[in-house]
Image (cartoon, rainbow, N blue to C red):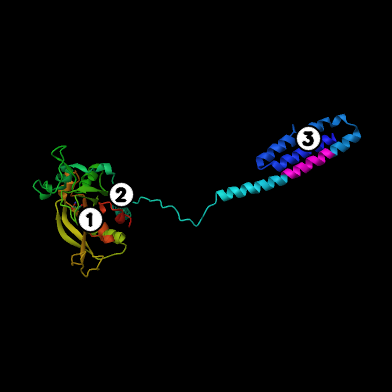
Amino acid sequence: MKEQLEKIYENATSDLTKASCINDLDEIRSKYLSRKGEFNEIKKNLKNLSDEDKRIVGSLANEITQKLEQALKTKHEEFYKKELDAKLAKERLDVTLPGKYIPRGKVHPITSTTNEIVASLQSLGFSVVPDAQSPEVETDYYNFDALNVPKDHPARDVQDTFYTTIAQNIVLRSQTSGAQIHAMENAKPPIRVISPGRVYRNENINARKNNFFHQIEGLYVDKDITFGDLKGVLNEFIRIYFGSSRPTRFRSSFFPFTEPSAEVDVQCIMCEGKGCRTCSGTGWLEVLGCGMVDPNVLENVGIDPDVYTGFAFGMGVERLAMLKYAIDDIRLFFNNDVRFLKQF
Ligand code: DAH
């Protein structure tokens, strides 16, 4: 039995020298040291020996299994370290390598400018009406008639407005002002809303004009609304949008749907009023149209102009973006040249 034990130990040691990985060690352990392993088989036969032999063989068996355990442990540590080193070497990360360039899309400057204008006006108490309430394809009633635009007004001309083939009275809206009518048809005063959107005009395209562009319409109808309220709101809007208060002037103008009407100029941001190319030497830049809602318009939507008054305004998004970022050609917004778009 003693020889048997020594023989097994010899075999185990020889297996151990041939082992090359942790898996091999696991096999050796199961072959020799598990419950069904070779040593255990021998230990099972101990009961047939005399007490004296039991003691001798038993203690030898223990000694040998302990030695084998120890050898396995040492090998295990060695292999573990080797396998770990190999794994680390293979998965090495070179933190000095330059990163991969992943191109990312950005918000278009017209969208971001719209968002900025909308946020400024929201902070002044205006809420945005749902897009669906004021569509881009409109009847001429909303685009013109309800807004007090006479039948023979030149803006209705096909040279200015795109008519569709859907029906004679269906146009691509030429202004967002129709949103005023929708808003007043959909709610009772007090109404304090804005409506951003795209508009279309049959223009010859140049640096200042495109055949579609974007506007933001505003409307405030309530009791006792005055021109002073209009001035206060627009001056505050300009301060928020341009980041500092700058001189403005309200220049008398005419729009069929407001009476009185005005256009608002801000002092040129490029030359601070001295006169430069951007402001054509005038020192002023026109930013929007506005006025007190014409009583005829209120009547068209069934609001009593003797009880309610209101103001309205409409601004061009491209124009406001061009002024803020000193862009001199509206076409840049629509050519989709990434070199331009990347700058925002
Ligand atoms: N709709 C006008 C335009 O496209 C702009 C405008 C002027 C809107 C005065 C208004 C307003 O609401 O009151 O030129």
Kind of residue at badge 2: Ser
Magenta region: which residues?
60-72
**Marks 1 and 3, Cα distance to the nearest angstrom?**
90 Å
Q: Let me know if residue 67 is in the magenta part.
A: yes
Magenta part, dominant SS: helix
User: Which quadrant would residue 48 be assigned to in this image?
Assistant: top right
Q: Position of residue 203 (x, y in %)?
A: 15, 51
Q: Position of residue 37 (x, y in %)?
A: 75, 33
Q: Are marks 1 and 2 in contact (CB under 8 Å)?
A: no
Q: Let me know if residue 198 is in the magenta part.
A: no
Q: Is residue 324 above or below residue 183?
A: below
Q: Residue furthest left?
A: 152
Q: Which residue in the protein does label 3 denote?
A: 39
Compare residues 30 and 321 and report the one nearer the observer: 30
**Marks 1 and 2, Cα distance to the nearest angstrom?**
28 Å
Q: Residue furthest bottom?
A: 274
Mark 3 residue element: helix
- Residue 15's label in the rendered image is none
Q: Which residue in the protein does label 1 denote?
A: 330
Instruction: Please identify, in this view, whether the residue under mark 1 or under mark 3 is nearer the observer.
Output: 3
Q: Which residue in the protein does label 2 denote?
A: 127
